[in-house]
Image (spheres, grey):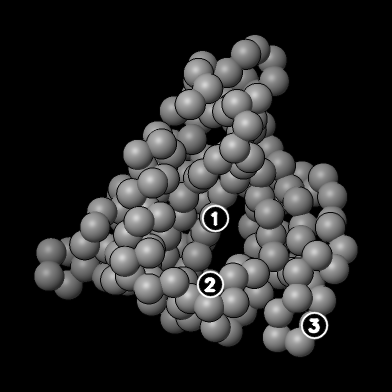
Amino acid sequence: MPDLTIRPACGDDISSIAAIYRHSVETGTASFELTPPDEAEMLRRHEAIVANGYPYLVCTTGEGGGERVLGYSYASAYRPRPAYRGTVENSVYVAPDAHRMGVGRALLNALIEEATRRGFRQMVAVIGDSGHVASVELHRTLGFETVGTLKNVGRKFGRWLDSVLMQRALGEGAETAPDREPT
């Protein structure tokens, strides 16, 4: 397994992030998006997430000019209403040639830590396609519980897809009020 570095994503990473996401959209069901967004849209999304105080991370290997982005993760608003301000939804995407190298686990672990540090209290995973056993298992091993399955809510590649909902507490969870104010 290569040495992995987790760090905040920056503008220079967007080309790699867009390529990873493009492959996921075009070939998989982790995302229910049908047309991959271009780099400008991916940069806009990145900037909006970061501007709203959410973590956005990349996993890299190599250094300096040889650094390569193997995957990325971010937390974003679970829902837009202020009452949800302490809850985030996670997203994790890994380059196709970096699967089974610990990249997803490293990214999700770091994302959980950073979201907790920022005062969020709940993290929700909305896993596209109940057939994503590896994603469900990764989340389970990091403390997520399955809280429901939405049956046949998306249609992609000519078939109906489920969404698996998983959740875990962050920090003090629901024991106290969140530190975050509505935005």
- The residue closer to the viewer here, 122 or 26, is 26
Measured from the top left, where is residue 179 in percent x and y? 51, 16
Residue 182 visible in the displayed image: yes
Q: Which residue is mark 3?
A: 159
Task: Measure how far apart labels 2 and 3 are at the Cα level.
Answer: 27 Å
Q: Which residue is mark 2?
A: 100
Q: Nearer the viewer, mark 1 or mark 2?
A: 1
Q: Residue furthest right?
A: 151
Relative to 29, say whether 157 is above or below: below
Residue at 77% x, 57% y is 164
**Which badge, 2 or 3, is on the more N-terminal residue?**
2
Measured from the top left, where is residue 116 in percent x and y? 50, 30
Measured from the top left, where is residue 173 in percent x and y? 65, 24
When asked about the image quadrant of residue 41, the answer is bottom left
Q: Is residue 98 left or right of residue 39?
A: right
Q: Residue furthest left?
A: 65
Q: Secondary structure at mark 3?
A: strand
Q: Is residue 106 left or right of residue 62?
A: right
Q: At label 1, which amino acid type do we have?
A: Ser
